[in-house]
Structure formats: C-alpha cells, structure tokens
Image (tube, helix red, strand yellow):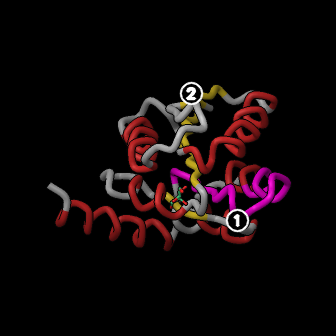
Amino acid sequence: MKIAVGSDHGGLELKKEVVRYLEAHGYEVKDFGTHTTDSCDYPEFGVAVAEAVVHGAYEKGVIICGTGQGIALAANKVKGARAVVCSDTFSAEMTRAHNDANILSLGERVVGKGLALKILETWLKTEFEGGRHTNRVDLIKATENKNFK
Ligand code: RB5
C-alpha cells in the first residue's frame, strides 16, 4: 500500500517514527514535508497529503502537527478527504470501520510514540464495514458536492 505522510515542525519527530514504522512493515511511503525543524504552516502539508490521496496516487495519508487538529482541518478542505484526529485506538478502529477515513491525523504533543504507532497500526488494519455506513459516508460526499465548487 502507498501512503502519503506530512507534518509541520510540531509533528516532525513523530513523523520520523511513523515513516520508520511504515517502511519496516512494507508500506511504500512518500513524505510531503516538512523536512526541517523550522517553523512552518501546517495547511501546506495537510493539503499536499490530502490532494495526493484524493487524486488517487496514494491509498491513505498520515498527517501530524502538534495537536493533529490544525493539519486535519486543512486536509478536510480538500474535496474527498476524510481526515480524522485520533488519540486512542477505539477511535482509530471506528473511523475506518464506520467513517471510511482516508487520512489519519496525529498530535505529536498529545500522544506518545508508543500509543501513536498502536493507533496507526489499528487504523491501517481496519477495513470499512460498508452496509449502513455507506449511506452515511455518501451523505458526507453529497454535502461536499453541494458546497464545494
Ligand atoms: C504549531 O506550533 C502548532 O500550532 C501546530 O503544530 C498544530 O498544533 C496546529 O494545529
């Protein structure tokens, strides 16, 4: 599976751990930046990852900032992105099973490395359940079609 990753400076260290984990588990990874500790703007990287996922080059995305919140807000402005902030494994499982999330957002200043990697593992291995949840995800898509130009 091809995975796009991105972070701002606040998520850089955790992103390195995430990339290490993904590569060790056989995923093909592209890091859309940032690559330094210099202060930068999280929307740039959230949007780059979301566009890479939505346009089909990458199956899933992982984005990281200090809280996971700002970068997810930005990613979700890309039509087709379903970015979710997870700080626990239950949410990681449910956001895949019920919401068909395509981008996982983590907060480096919120979760430790061990929990973050467990969240990532859970999120990646959980399949969308479909069924009654398909209609709900379709309603999100219909709302996008109505409101996004
Ligand atoms: C950067 O200081 C910080 O604001 C950013 O990483 C993130 O937490 C924003 O949501």
Residue 109 covered by magenta stretch = yes
Residue in view at x 42 percent, y 35 percent: 52
Q: Secondary structure at mark 2?
A: strand
The residue that label 1 is drawn on is 110
Residue in view at x 62 percent, y 48 percent: 11
Which residues fall within the magenta stretch? 102-119
Q: Is residue 111 positioned above or below 32 on the image?
A: below
Amino acid type, callout 1: Val
Whole-angstrom CA distance, mark 1 to mark 2, is 24 Å
**Outermost residue, front side:** 38
Viewer-closest of 9 and 89: 9
Residue in view at x 45 percent, y 49 percent: 42
Query: What percent of the width, then of the height, locates residue 34?
Result: 53, 35
Disc number placed over residue 30 in the picture, else none: 2
Q: Is residue 45 positioned above or below 81 on the image?
A: above
Amino acid type, callout 2: Lys
For marks 1 and 2 on the same chain, the one whose residue lies earlier in the sequence = 2
Lateral position of residue 84 relative to residue 91, left or right: left
Q: Secondary structure at mark 1?
A: loop
Q: Is residue 107 visible?
A: yes
